[in-house]
Image: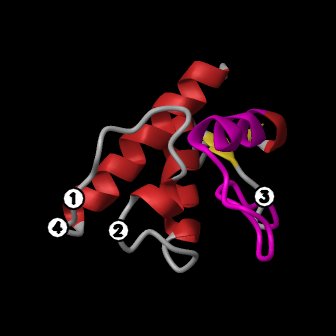
Amino acid sequence: MTLDEARTAVVMILTDIQARSGLPCPPLSGSTVPPKALEKFDSTVWPAATTLIARKLGVTIPNDVHIFGTKGASPLTIDQSAMIICAKATPKAPVKAAA
């Protein structure tokens, strides 16, 4: 997975979340800080967004990896989130078919 693939997945999922929530979504770029730019995008939504991004990319992102920021620290940009995803994600193991 490349940084561009991770960035694209983050942007697609965040845009979809805002649309499904009936909330506005400004144009998103690598320098966008989602918790600051997106209405109602807070730490209660982050785990679901992380799961959807992982599914989109076909990877596993460990539960203890916070791709949008951590408590007490400044929230991250989309580029920073994509870098964390590339560094911490592992490919999902193929599912074995039942015999």
Of labels 4 and 3, earlier in sequence is 4
Q: Element type at marker 4?
A: loop
According to the picture, the residue beneath numbered tag 3 turns out to be: 62
Q: Amino acid at mark 3?
A: Pro
Q: Nearer the viewer, mark 3 or mark 1?
A: 1
Q: Residue visible at 45% across and 33% down?
A: 29
Q: Position of residue 81 (x, y in %)?
A: 66, 44
Q: Amino acid at mark 2?
A: Glu
Residue 50 vs residue 66: left or right?
left
Of labels 3 and 1, earlier in sequence is 1
According to the picture, the residue beneath numbered tag 4 turns out to be: 22
Residue 39 bears which disc, if any? 2
Q: Residue visible at 35% across and 68% down?
A: 39
Of labels 3 and 2, earlier in sequence is 2
The rendered magenta stretch, by its main secondary structure, is classed as: loop
The quadrant where residue 19 appears: bottom left
Q: Element type at marker 1?
A: loop
Separation of residues labelled 4 and 1 (CA atoms): 7 Å
According to the picture, the residue beneath numbered tag 1 turns out to be: 24
